[in-house]
Amino acid sequence: MSNPLLSVEHVSKTYVSGGGLFGQAKSARVVSDISFSLNRGDVFALVGESGSGKTTIGRMLLRLIEPDAGRIHFDGIDVRALDAGALRRLRRRVQIIFQDPFGSLDPRVRIGAAIAEPILLHRLRPRAQVADRVAELLTLVGLDGRHAARYPHEFSGGQRQRIAIARALAVEPELIVCDEPVSALDLSIQAQVVNLLGELRARLGVSYVFISHDMAVVRHLATHIGVLYAGRLVETGPSETVFTDPRHPYTRMLLAATPSPVPDVVRQREAIAGEPPSPFSTWSQCRFASRCAHRMEPCMAGEPVLAQAAPAPRLSACLRAAELPTFAAVDDGEERMTAAYRTRLGLLRHARAAADAEACSSQRQAAASAVSALSPH
Ligand SMILES: Nc1ncnc2c1ncn2[C@@H]1O[C@H](COP(=O)(O)OP(=O)(O)OP(=O)(O)O)[C@@H](O)[C@H]1O
Ligand code: SF4
Ligand SMILES: [Mg+2]
């Protein structure tokens, strides 16, 4: 079996604050002992409530935040051991897209120049070909190649996020960390951008670490999911099985708390009861215990480790993972959804089907070339 494109092992991050002349230093362990891996072409979604550590993990992958402990390997390269020059080269292969499409573009720079900058910096095309490459990238993300001379404010939020994606693609990355890339956009625009990411995955083979709190978006894009609670992964596995058969009470809570797309349906309030713990907490019990309806005595005796919970490769950090009852997903009934949600669902489904079809056709082509390479000439 080939090595994973990205491998993250036991990564942690602690912030220390205070500790001046009169104060006592306080440690906030915001990310604890994170391990996961991703193969080429995979989409690993990191989901969890606000403050659970998603952005910290995403930024640590590119060393925009330095981890305190653990190992990160990209295509076999030890990311934590890289010097400044090697790190710059790595950041050509691994890109990041942020939530705010306006904030990530300089309002004074024409979008063509913004997209051209990394191409010139990394000398990816002769200078004379850069304008054509910019137009090609704009077309690839569904924008008009002739709009390169415009400024960011001349575009809508969804178009600006497409520009940010074109800029990330300019360096032909193998992995893109997407940190809530659609959260700031309208429902239907969200679906279009998610579609685009899915298409690019199928056409260019780009892999993603996709950070989101929106389970509907994650379901349509992710191949694998990592559920983060208070800085720790509490469940991981292939996307479809995590959605249909969650093996951690927190995953179930997140799924149950997804806002209903039906106007008159209010989801069960107990589904979102309780607050996440403070990052200053220390743990001698399951960190989800204060909110868990399945808690029992042994849960207070130590923190459960992430262990196999169902057929491999499913993992859960719950002592009762195997006993949890079958999960009854809430069926909202498409016909009762608001028009905006129905449109979004339709677009997301279309994206999935198109991406799957494209992936099948690339696999068929690869298989055909492999066969013809084997055939005697
Ligand atoms: N520089 C810092 N110093 C101290 N604490 C920090 C710092 N940066 C982040 N934190 C804390 O780390 C925790 C994780 O933050 P992070 O931004 O990674 O969460 P998140 O899951 O991305 O949240 P959101 O969904 O709101 O974006 C939070 O409790 C945050 O307050
Ligand atoms: S270990 Fe216990 S408290 Fe923790 S999630 Fe499982 S059942 Fe709940
Ligand atoms: Mg964040």
Image: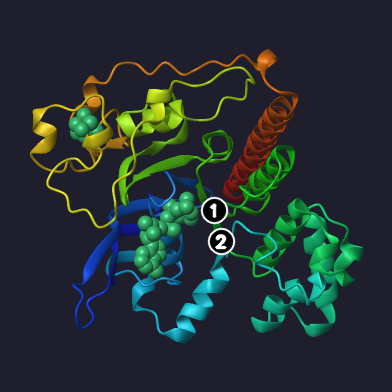
User: Position of 280 compared to 107: left or right?
Assistant: left
Quarter where residue 335 is shown:
top right
The amino acid type, in three-letter code, at marker 2 is: Glu
Q: Residues within 10 Å of mark 2 (few under 14, many from 20)?
A: many
* Residue farthest along the right direction in this orientation: 146
User: Position of 132 compared to 100: left or right?
Assistant: right
The residue at 37%/72% (across/down) is 66
Quarter where residue 165 is shown:
bottom right
Quadrant where ligand 1 appears: bottom left
- Dot 1: element: strand
Q: Which residue is mark 2?
A: 174
Q: Earlier in the sequence, mark 1 or mark 2?
A: 2
Q: CA distance from mark 1 to mark 2?
A: 6 Å
The residue at 38%/18% (across/down) is 327
- Tell me: residue 298, above or below residue 264: below
Q: Which residue is mark 1?
A: 207
The amino acid type, in three-letter code, at marker 1 is: Ser
